[in-house]
Image: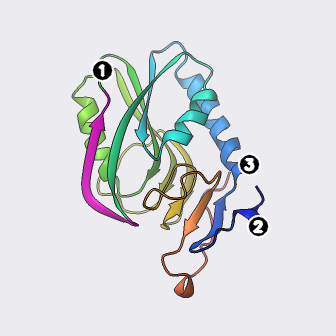
Amino acid sequence: MSEAQAVMTGNVTTVLIDEERLQARIRELGHEITSDYAERDLVLLCLLKGGIYFTSDLSRSIDLPITLEFVRARSYAGTESTGEVKLSWIDGLDISNRDVLIVEDIVDTGLTLVEIWKALEAQNPATLDICTLLYKEKHLAQPFPLRYIGFTIEDVFVVGYGLDLEEQYRNLPHIAVFHPDDADRDEPTGLLNPP
């Protein structure tokens, strides 16, 4: 899909990270993780729903035996964080004495990660780290050591590649900016750390 075709009707107008750059960076992350976790018992813990596309592609870029687990976390209503995180766990989650890598679509306020981190620590993993596709460089509710970051972006609301607005736009193959009011917006300058 070309960038011209990717421009949606309504308020999704700016492609921030195109599909080619996105997939290239995910392959790089996969190679790093393969090297760092060689001969270890790696569990990729996908945060649903937003992390599903990233986790799927990332897992195929990791050349190691891995286990996939899933947790559903929700803290957004529309374009704003509610400040309250709701977690739903799959049955049979077992991470005791295993190396756990949380795979997140975006780190924004950090509120979701606070709750996830506490819940996972209580299960005594051997190690616990975070891999996020996107990181908004701003003051977090609680800072976290992010081991792997795909892209650092401006503080804008983004959709696509798993990220949504009221369950819409997840299936875009790229990351795009959602503008709540097209008439009164400034164009974002782009990525803060383009590879």
First in sequence, mark 2 or 1: give its number.
2
Q: Residues within 10 Å of mark 2 (few under 14, many from 20)?
A: few
First in sequence, mark 3 or 1: give its number.
3
First in sequence, mark 2 or 3: give its number.
2
Q: Residues within 10 Å of mark 3 (few under 14, many from 20)?
A: few
Query: Measuring 28% from the left and 31% from the top, which residue is drawn there?
Result: 120
Q: Which residue is mark 3?
A: 20
Query: Measuring 43% from the left and 44% from the top, which residue is drawn there?
Result: 49
* Discs 2, 1 touching: Cβ within 8 Å: no
The residues bearing labels 3 and 1 have C-alpha atoms spaced at a distance of: 36 Å
Locate residue 170, reporting x and y percent: 54, 53
Disc sitting over residue 4 in the figure:
2
Say what amino acid the circle numbered 1 marks. Gly
State which region is magenta: 78-90
Q: Which residue is mark 1?
A: 92
Residue 79 is one of the magenta-drawn residues: yes
The residues bearing labels 2 and 1 have C-alpha atoms spaced at a distance of: 45 Å
Query: Measuring 76% from the left and 55% from the top, which residue is drawn there?
Result: 1
Locate residue 81, reporting x and y percent: 33, 62
Secondary structure of the residue carrying numbered label 2: helix
Q: Residue furthest bottom?
A: 183
